[in-house]
Amino acid sequence: MVVLAQQTTIGGIVIDEKTGRPLSQVSVSVGRISVVTNEDGAFTLKLAEMPRNLTVSHLGYKSREVTLEAGKTESLKIRLQPTVIHLREVVVRTGNPRELVDIAIKKIPDNYSRQPELLKAFYRETAMKRKHFIYVAEGVEDMYKTSYTRGIGRDRVAIIKGRRLLSQKQGDTLGLKVIGGPVLPVQLDVVKNYELLLNPEELDAYSYSWGTPEFINDRMQMVVLIEPKYKKDWALYHGKLYIDNERLAFTRVELSLDMSDKEKATRTMLVRKPIGVRFKPRELTCVVDYRYADGVTRISYLRNTFRFNCDWKKRLFSTSFTATCEMAVTDRQTENVHPIASRNSFDSRDSYYDKVEYFLDPEYWSNYNIIEPSESLDKAIRKLVSTYQRN
């Protein structure tokens, strides 16, 4: 646990310079410490000392260095300028884009960490019934990752601090578990977990085409689009692979589960359900971001969204649910790193709900860096807390 003796708090919102629209999932960092903005574009960064500046970056926007002034750090309004790609900047790729993917795979040992690292991360999972939050759980976790020359077999996650809220209304609770949890940053690290996508058998099942190039952190990214080509016994994905034009490193992966076969999609999304409930999958999307720093590319952000309907045999209408898991790496340790013992790690078969405590303390997170709750989520949390206190 890292305890800050003296804390500096930096906060504000990030908006589009032209439209004024708040920007979510924007990376805000000072050195190795970082957070991302929430759905309202808001962020809070907690540091041991006052920095001179911070770096703000987002897909499709010019990165920005913001100079900080003492006493003016808690209501910042940071405007990002959309990136305009000029024709002279576009690198025209010809041939099969699959070849670029294969090259990027071969360069993984050069582009990603070759030593064990311990990453500090903030994790949140929520569930909504129609448009109302019925469940919130969040926590700070340690994530041990071995070298990217190895698989994910020894990668572990340990919960440092966590809390949960569940609706007390009868009928809101759904005894249904979807795949997810704090181990998602291990399982969905596409670059490291070859079994998910970047292996010959899986890659051969897709067709490839060029997408429109984008900028990430002011660096040109080639975009490869993938679509299912052959049928497999399991559901495949539609996706975008962002590859740095110079380093040839994967910097962002966007995947959307193919829903053409509902039975296959259900097997991917569902672990178990109550008897008598019919599960109808609607969407499974995943975004994984990687950040380049100190000569190494590392996983930095992940968001996984499930949408599905459930109906009961005796009910006329089905009910829509949305479950979201979100993780942001906030710090890292690269020296004197030790594996997380199995007895202390979170298992994919565990329920996060059972591993953390109910919370009421508004100062719960203290000095930890977190993804600030959006205004709607903050209201939902207050409502769930007040309902719990009345019962």
Image (cartoon, rainbow, N blue to C red):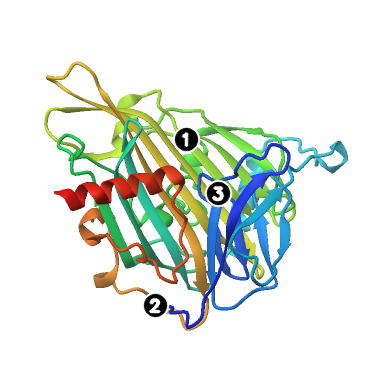
Q: Residue furthest top?
A: 316
- Secondary structure of the residue carrying tag 1 is strand
Q: Residue at x 76, y 38 (%)?
A: 93
Residue 76: x and y in percent read: 64, 57
**Left of 63 or right of it: where is 138?**
left
> Which residue is label 3 attached to?
25
Mark 2: few/some/many CA within 10 Å (<14, 14-19, 20+): few
Please name the amino acid that badge 1 sits on.
Ser
Q: Amino acid at mark 2?
A: Met
SS class of the residue under badge 3? Answer: loop
Image position of 255 (left or right of 66): left
Of pointers 3 and 2, the one earlier in the residue sequence: 2
Q: Nearer the viewer, mark 1 or mark 3?
A: 3
Residue type, mark 3 in image: Gln
Lower position in the chain sequence, tag 1 or tag 3:
3
Spot occupied by residue 80 in the image (x, y as percentages of width and height) = 70, 48
Drawn side of residue 216 relative to residue 165, left or right: right
Q: Quadrant of residue 162?
A: bottom left
- Label number found at residue 268: none
Mark 1 surroundings within 10 Å by alpha-carbon count, few (fewer than 14), some (14 through 19), many (20 or more): some
Pick the residue in front: 359 or 82: 359
Q: Quadrant of residue 257?
A: top left
What residue is pinned by disc 2?
1
Q: Are marks 1 and 2 in contact (CB under 8 Å)?
A: no
Q: Which mark is residue 256?
A: 1
